[in-house]
């Protein structure tokens, strides 16, 4: 099957679109990316998303309109990746759309009671003619899970090492990890959870410190020139989220714009220059990841496979390697995968599993009581023909 995965992460900087070819079924699934693109949001659109994630700025009418506007942009991204692949929409079987997370409701106990991902799938299906599967997370929550991390399912199928434990660490807006037992281990199950902030606090600090001229620390340049305030870092590491035991998830409602502003203000009170503020916030992301490994890894980790935007930050990678001296810190590219498009690939894979009525969650990863089929199906023009092709 040809399936497009669409993803907009917590950084809300663009849409990742990956046209994938998927064959087989677990545990013998084969998947390859045929074509992938990053589809930039129009100027000012990222700010609209971020405002929608803030209770003080979010309003029902603006979220309502944003839901439809994002549907239009996701549809355009899908059509563009189809065009660049040199095929037509009629050649594509499914679209798997994660949409954009606006709010992830985590109770003080750590239990997730609700989640909201927007991006109107009816718009995507209507504009492309392709059956679209979307809204993957709520079903896992309904079954008692966290609704995340869903990338762990793909990691389990595709990235286990023959002989030793791996950590698959994504650093997008948030950080999340999947601890994978080796293929030779038939006893242990994978463990996955959000480690805490990824790029969100770094990006937020950069946006404030540069008056909006820079929304991220390119190549970790500012962080590498600054001085880490170790005393402050120790205080930041006492955040109660880190004490919660997995499974657990988080988002911008905790590690987002409000916290970024507080960090910048506190850094200036401590007499730090801009470079040192960014260096310390970057060190917080690295320290929270390493702390999570030290606390919750089921076995010694020998390889850390980094993905997401954080994998392109040498300052962050260097800090993490120094904090995990017995592990080898690598990127997805080192093992033959494109880290920029991995999450889009994941939602193409989840759409494939949903279409064939197979669960897309692992209870050991999300905390659900049992495996469930994820997502909702919005029929496209190809719906009837796809049923005949795949089910009859």
Image (cartoon, rainbow, N blue to C red):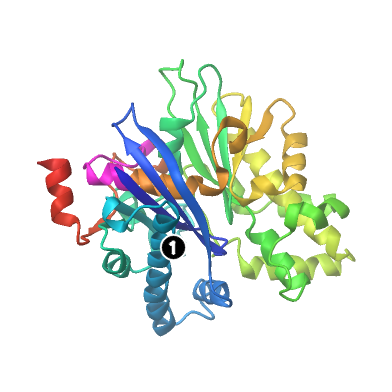
113 in the magenta segment = no
**Left or right: 64 in relation to 192:** left
Where on the picture, by quarter, is residue 133? bottom left
Instruction: Say which quadrant the N terminus sits in.
Output: top left
Q: Residue at label 1?
A: 77
Note whether 87 is above or below 271 in the view shown.
above
Residue 306 visible in the current orientation: yes
Residue at 58%, 40% in the rendered image: 169
| Residue 188 coordinates in the image, percent (x, y) | 44, 23
**Left or right: 233 in relation to 187:** right
Instruction: Say which quadrant the C terminus sits in.
Output: top left
| Residues drawn in magenta | 351-363
| Residue 174 coordinates in the image, percent (x, y) | 57, 53
Residue at 67%, 39% in the rendered image: 290
Residue closest to the eye, 89 or 272: 89
Note whether 185 is above or below 380 in the view shown.
above
Note whether 69 is above or below 191 in the view shown.
below
Note whether 12 is above or below 281 in the view shown.
below
Return the residue found at the far left. 392
The local crowd at label 1, few if under 14, some if 14 to 19, many if 20 or more residues have their Cα within 10 Å, is: many
């Amino acid at each position: 099957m040809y399936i497009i995965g669409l993803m907009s992460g917590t950084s809300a900087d663009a849409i990742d679109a990956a046209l994938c070819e998927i064959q087989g079924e677990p545990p013998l699934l084969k998947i390859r990316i045929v074509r992938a693109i990053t589809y930039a949001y129009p100027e000012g659109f990222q700010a609209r998303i971020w405002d929608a994630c803030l209770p003080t700025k979010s309003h029902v009418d603006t979220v309502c309109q944003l839901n439809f506007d994002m549907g239009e942009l996701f549809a355009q991204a899908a059509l563009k990746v189809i065009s660049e692949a040199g095929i037509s929409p009629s050649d594509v079987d499914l679209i798997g759309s994660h949409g954009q997370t606006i709010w992830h409701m985590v109770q003080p106990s750590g239990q997730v009671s609700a989640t909201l991902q927007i991006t109107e799938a009816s718009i995507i299906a209507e504009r492309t003619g392709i059956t679209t599967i979307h809204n993957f997370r709520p079903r896992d929550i309904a079954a008692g899970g966290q609704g995340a991390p869903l990338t762990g399912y793909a990691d389990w199928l595709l990235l286990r090492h023959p002989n030793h434990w791996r950590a698959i660490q994504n650093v997008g807006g948030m950080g999340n990890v999947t601890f994978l037992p080796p293929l030779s281990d038939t006893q242990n199950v994978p463990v996955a959870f959000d480690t805490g902030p990824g790029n969100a606090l770094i990006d937020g600090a950069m946006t404030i410190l540069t008056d909006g001229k820079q929304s991220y620390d390119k190549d970790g340049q500012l962080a590498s020139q600054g001085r880490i305030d170790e005393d402050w870092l120790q205080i930041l590491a006492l955040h109660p989220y880190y004490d919660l035991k997995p499974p657990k998830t988080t988002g911008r409602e905790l590690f987002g714009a409000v916290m970024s502003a507080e960090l910048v203000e506190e850094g200036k009170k401590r007499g730090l220059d801009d470079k040192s503020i960014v260096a310390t916030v970057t060190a917080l992301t690295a320290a929270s990841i390493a702390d999570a490994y030290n606390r919750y890894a089921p076995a010694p980790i020998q390889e850390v496979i980094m993905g997401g935007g954080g994998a392109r930050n040498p300052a962050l990678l260097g800090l993490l390697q120094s904090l995990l001296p017995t592990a080898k810190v690598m990127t997805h590219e080192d093992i033959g995968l494109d880290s920029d498009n991995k999450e889009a690939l994941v939602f193409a894979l989840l759409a494939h599993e949903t279409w064939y009525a197979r669960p897309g969650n692992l209870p050991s990863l999300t905390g659900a009581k049992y495996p469930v089929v994820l997502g909702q199906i919005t029929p496209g023009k190809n719906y009837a023909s796809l049923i005949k092709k795949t089910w009859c």
